[in-house]
Amino acid sequence: MPKYVIERELAGAGQLPADTLQAISQKSCSVLQGLGPQIQWVQSYVTDNKIYCIYIAPNKEMVLEHAAQGGFPANSVAEVRTMIDPTTAE
């Protein structure tokens, strides 16, 4: 199943309090439950003004549907083609 990186522009994301991040996470999980088991949220990275999310989904359209139903920005959705890490250099 394809993996996607979603870039969400959210001013001040890095300063959001824990309860706000929890509410965002709960909303995301609720939408995911409604969309079914084909789409999975792996994890997200919160930076100063963006959140980068990793999702597994059958296609980009489902990722965009999750964003639309949740009211989340999805400024960029890119399919992961391969992964590399320090062991790739060996």
Image (tube, rainbow, N blue to C red):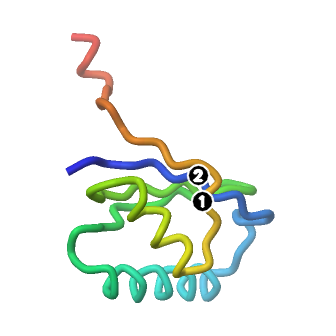
Question: Is 30 drawn above or below residue 44 in the view shown?
Answer: below
Q: Position of residue 52 (x, y in %)?
A: 54, 54
Query: Callout 1 environment at 10 Å: few (<14), some (14 to 19), or many (20+)?
Result: many
Question: Is 37 drawn above or below residue 53 in the view shown?
Answer: below
Q: Position of residue 70 (x, y in %)?
A: 54, 80
Name the residue furthest front: 61
Image quarter (top left, top right, bottom left or bottom right) of the C terminus: top left
Question: Is 89 drawn above or below residue 8 in the view shown?
Answer: above
Mark 2 = which residue? Answer: 7
Label 2 element class:
strand
* Towards the viewer: 87 or 9: 9
The three-letter amino acid code for the residue at tag 2 is: Glu
Query: Callout 2 environment at 10 Å: few (<14), some (14 to 19), or many (20+)?
Result: some
Quarter of the view holding residue 14:
bottom right
- The reply, left or right, for residue 24 in relation to residue 66 is right
Instruction: Specify which label sits upstream in the sequence, 2 or 1.
Output: 2
Do residues under tags 2 and 1 come within 8 Å of each other at their CB atoms?
yes
At 22% from the left and 68% from the top, the residue drawn is 38
Mark 1 = which residue? Answer: 74
Name the residue furthest right: 11
Q: Position of residue 56 (x, y in %)?
A: 30, 57
At 41% from the left and 53% from the top, the residue drawn is 60
Quarter of the view holding residue 16:
bottom right
Real-space CA distance between mark 2 and mark 1, rounded to the nearest whole angstrom: 6 Å
- The reply, left or right, for residue 54 in relation to residue 50 is left
At 20% from the left and 51% from the top, the residue drawn is 1
At 67% from the left and 56% from the top, the residue drawn is 50
- The reply, left or right, for residue 78 in relation to residue 39 is right
The three-letter amino acid code for the residue at tag 1 is: Ala
